[in-house]
Image (tube, grey):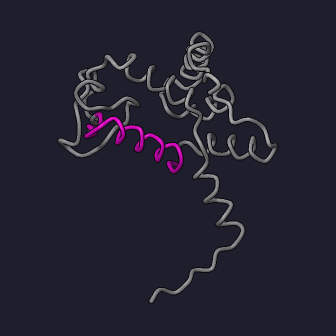
Amino acid sequence: QYAARSVDTKSLNSLLKRVDIIPESMVLIQAANESGWGSSRFAREGFNFFGEWCFSNGCGIVPSSRGSGKIHEVEIFPSVDASVSSYMRNLNSNTAYALFRSIRADLRAQEAELSADQLIYGLVNYSERQEAYIDELLDMLRHNEKYLVKADV
């Protein structure tokens, strides 16, 4: 028999910040950016469309431009689904993306649309390039927006 856990409002609100949606257009733009539109070695050989790293020897593909003394590899996934799931779990739980979750929660509190052009700012820690990375994603989003609009069914 399991004892019921007591859940207070603070812990419930914290959990709800982690289970909200990630806009499809943001996912697609970031995947296109990180994988060179699916043509990168990491995407082709490891189904890694989001540039996710791992840190144990043999866990992934060693980047050819990895600096000396660095141990990271680019993680290998068994499928596209596994790559996307890992990416979503990463954004929804990693402390590096607390800003992303905070922006999303603020938009929810204002009953505003969870739009990629606002949420992308929360990805500032996704790349060492930080603001330049954000600018690049926003440019890609604007340039490809007409292809990302869902048709009414």
Q: In x, y percent, where is residue 128?
A: 47, 27
Quarter of the figure with residue 66: top left
* The image quarter in which residue 72 lies: top left
x, y percentage for residue 109?
Answer: 79, 47
**The stretch drawn in magenta includes residue 78:** yes
For image coordinates 48% across by 43% down, the residue present is 88
Q: Is residue 136 above or below residue 80?
A: above
Is residue 90 toward the left or the right of residue 131 in the image? left
Residue name at image x 72 percent, y 68 percent: 9
Farthest residue in the bottom direction? 1
Magenta stretch? 74-94
- Give whichever of 64, 13 is nearer the camera: 13
Q: x and y percent of residue 92 in the render?
A: 53, 47
Tell me where residue 129 appears, x and y as whole percent. Answer: 50, 23
Q: Is residue 87 left or right of residue 99?
A: left
Locate residue 37 relative to residue 149 in the image: left or right: left
Give the quarter of the figure containing the C terminus: top right
Q: Nearer the viewer, residue 6 or 122?
A: 6
